[in-house]
Amino acid sequence: MLRYTLKRLLSLLISLAIASLVIFATIEVAPGDPAFFMLGINAQEDTLAALRVELGLDKSKPQRYWAWITGMIHGDFGTSYQYRTPISGMISARLWVSLPLALYALVISVLIAFPVGIYAATKRGKKGDLIVMGATQFGLAIPNFWFAMMLVLIFAINLRWFSAGGFTSWDKGVFSALKSLTLPALALALPQAAILARVMRSALLDVLSEDFIRTARAKGLSRRQTLQYHGLRNAMIPVLTILGLQLSFLLAGGIIIEQVFYLPGLGRLIFQSISARDLIVVESVTMLLVFAVIIINFIIDLAYAIVDPRLRARS
Amino acid sequence: MLAAIVSFAWTPFDHTSLNIPNKLQAPNGTHWLGTDHFGRDMFSMIMVGARTSITVAFVAVGIGLGLGVPLGLWATARQGGWTDEIIMRGNDLIFAFPSLVIAILITAVFGPGAVNAIIAIGIFNIPVFARVTGGGALQLWTREFILAARVAGKGAIRISIEHILPNLANLLIVQATIQFSLGILAEAALSYVGLGAQPPTPSWGRMLADAQTLVSIAPHMALVPGFSIILTVLGLNLLGDGLRDLLDPKLQQVQK
């Protein structure tokens, strides 16, 4: 297990190093001088030069890359060109929107997908299964931002149950904050639930055709008990994989949904920074999202090895 | 697909012609799918928009096939060697990236537009095809007819092209269909946030962005492009499933 963990940890570090290099290089080739952008077209040459020194732009590329990376390890994400405030502060305020949104969506997705997937698997080939599978095909085809607009149209504009956008901050009470995240979370969750339900169904069908299921039935367990004690547990491995992938997708996919609902999360921060050409914010937030995704994948890999001892033995 | 081809020759109205007095009309006899906030004919815009979506998705799949398949073949031909290791690790790495975030980064840095959207979506198709090719080729390499080809003195690269690739065609066609539908969704998302095709080129995603503020007074503006995307993607997914059933001999045996 230790060997496996170390091997995974090494590949995690390599991934992070390459990812940060790619992001840094992409931002590096972007046209435009940040100092010129901050001071405007009437700036004097000497003030421009002074600002470049202040921002560290006069240093060589490897030096700046190193400063960026070591800064981030210490929690210093740099200073926004636009607002002249530390980016870490901007990020932490917005994480309190993006992270709960992703988790909320994940919970909804699981609550819908598990029962639906299990139901479809037990009714294999029958009417209920066909209806569920047809519905999930639609779920796969619906763009989540369009679905979000439809939710706004129905629940915010026509029924007036929710507000059409914006975020009520957590200090105004957990309930109202959650309420303002409900429509966005639903919009994010439903297409994901469609995928998850399909995976749950096929994983369960695979397991149910195994010999040990027949044995369990033969020794007198009811269908329900067999499903509960032997079926579900063994079907969880592929389901967990997809679940992990979905959490990272929900975190990154929230970007677009935040745009629809005007939520002040990381996604809106990225877009606002893009339009203000505040590229250092784009750079650091992108790196943070990539970091989160890579870490989640790492944790899933470890979770596998705990659930499935065969994987440990192989490496 | 049909709409896109027809749109080259004919659209009911010019998709760029503004007709302000006729704005926000609901679907009617003249404008089959209604008009938008500039009085443009929605039906014509959907047809030309289909062209944008399909081109972007098609070229992006082309990039994936063109680079991913040779990489996958190469990795398996040099099985166990350091090239195999590098290609497959590189694949895992791109897989670990949140594709949407990187697509946004690319279009943000190099400027929004259809070409950059194609590149951004295409890059993430490369590892998908490399992995499908690699996985399929790995199984084929253990088969007798490959051994026979080796005995006949053919090199690894020649075997890859002459024997492995034709046997992977089915697998790749199915995967291409799936990536094509994902490409259409991705293009819609990018142009929805303003990073895809730029005005006046119509695209389904941007039509939805235009519709957002007007959704309460003119719901058809959101419904029409939305259903266009859903029907296209749904059709492609079902086509992919159908092709898989048709082309995969293993599945056919199960059905018999």
Image (cartoon, coloured by chain):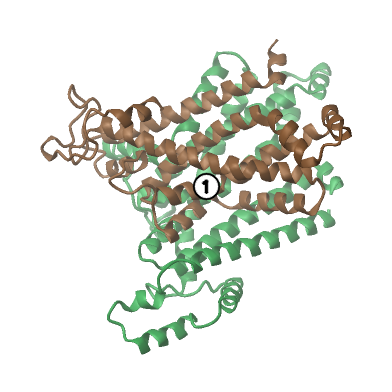
Q: Which residue is mark 1?
A: A250
Q: Is residue B179 left or right of residue B48?
A: right
Which residue is nearer to you in this view: B237 or A237? B237
Q: Picture coordinates of residue B4 (x, y %)?
A: 37, 30
Q: Residues within 10 Å of mark 1 (few under 14, many from 20)?
A: many
Q: Residue furthest left?
A: B21
Q: Judging from the image, what is the letter of the chain drawn in green?
A: A
Q: Secondary structure at mark 1?
A: helix
Question: Does B125 sit left or right of B201 as displayed?
Answer: right
Which chain wears brown? B
Residue at screen point 37% across, 89% down? A46
Q: From this viewpoint, is residue B204 visible?
A: yes
Q: Chain of mark 1?
A: A
Q: Horizontally, is B131 left or right of B177 in the view?
A: right
Please say whether residue A97 is visible from this viewpoint: no
Q: Amino acid at mark 1?
A: Leu
Rendered view: B183 above or below B4: below
Residue ranking furthest to the bottom: A46
